[in-house]
Image (cartoon, rainbow, N blue to C red):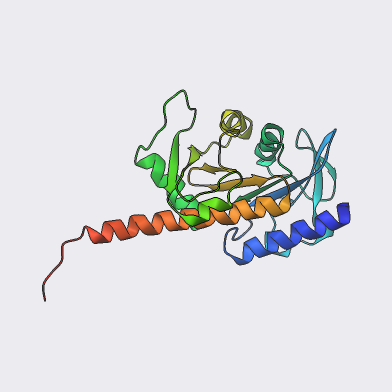
């Protein structure tokens, strides 16, 4: 099982890298290897995620400590673990796409904030798009998706603690401002589907904002 999962995870990472969603050494990706005690199979930190071989993956425990493999675990492993514990996810995929980075940052800058009781620093709203139905539990385009945004924080334990209460109602995704998207699912297939759907929705959102801005420009006669 571990060998098959490792092959599937590295193939997924390579596909995501080819789409330009984790350039350089960006992004981190994990699958649940076992739940009791919790162990994650994941990419090591500081490597090109498109060229990781199955044997290069590491195994970490529920505290983010490396149990197997030669690489080191990313500090963001703590957020992966929080998502797995809170949502029972089987896989977590974190990307640094242009759309996710741009919209998460501009949302906070524009002051699109939630109430203090909600816990999010902001949210990106997407609605009336057919692709919304690719998210778990949604069956019509006629719905509203609120993707929570949290301000970035280099203290990953604190950031994970802030993210935790938002995860149950999040649409299988969470944005970190100026950083990127975390998406998850019951297994690797569903996590990748949610990632691709959310990236599509974010891409649509910023393009629509651009079109709306262009439509308000004055028309000059020749």
Say above or below: 50 vs 89.
below
- Disc tally is 0
Q: In this view, does 145 lie to the left or right of 210?
A: right
Q: In this view, does 190 lie to the left or right of 143?
A: right
Q: Position of residue 214 (x, y in %)?
A: 26, 61
Q: Residue at left 69%, top 63%? A: 14
Q: Position of residue 7 (x, y in %)?
A: 81, 60
Say above or below: 16 vs 76.
below
Q: Quadrant of residue 83?
A: top right
Q: Residue at left 44%, top 24%? A: 116
Say above or below: 112 vs 102.
above
Q: Where is residue 184 in the image (x, y as percent from the top left)?
A: 65, 45
Q: Quadrant of residue 189?
A: bottom right
Asked whether residue 96 is in view, the answer is no
Q: Residue at left 59%, top 65%? A: 19
Residue farthest along the bottom direction in this orientation? 222
Q: Which of 32 and 54 is in front in this view?
A: 32
Q: Residue at left 54%, top 36%? A: 153
Where the C terminus falls, by quadrant? bottom left
Q: Nearer the viewer, residue 20 or 214?
A: 214
Asked whether residue 113 is in view, the answer is yes
Residue farthest along the left direction in this orientation? 221
């Amino acid at each position: 099982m571990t060998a098959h999962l490792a092959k599937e995870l590295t193939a997924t990472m390579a596909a995501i890298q080819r789409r330009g969603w984790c350039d350089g050494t960006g992004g981190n990706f994990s699958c649940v290897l076992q739940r009791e005690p919790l162990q994650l199979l994941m990419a090591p930190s500081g490597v090109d995620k498109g060229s990781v071989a199955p044997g290069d993956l590491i195994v970490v425990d529920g505290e983010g400590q490396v149990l197997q493999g030669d690489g080191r675990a990313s500090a963001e492993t703590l957020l992966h673990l929080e998502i797995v514990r809170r949502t029972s996810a089987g896989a977590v995929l974190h990307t640094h796409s242009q759309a996710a980075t741009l919209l998460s940052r501009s949302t906070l800058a524009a002051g699109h904030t939630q109430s203090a009781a909600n816990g999010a620093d902001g949210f990106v709203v997407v609605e009336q798009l057919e692709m919304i139905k690719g998210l778990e539990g949604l069956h019509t385009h006629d719905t509203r998706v609120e993707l929570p945004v949290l301000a970035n924080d280099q203290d990953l334990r604190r950031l994970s603690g802030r993210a935790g209460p938002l995860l149950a109602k999040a649409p299988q995704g969470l944005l970190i401002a100026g950083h990127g998207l975390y998406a998850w699912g019951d297994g690797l297939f569903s996590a990748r589907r949610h990632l691709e759907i959310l990236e599509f929705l974010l891409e649509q959102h910023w393009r629509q904002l651009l079109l709306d801005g262009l439509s308000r420009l004055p028309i000059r006669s020749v």
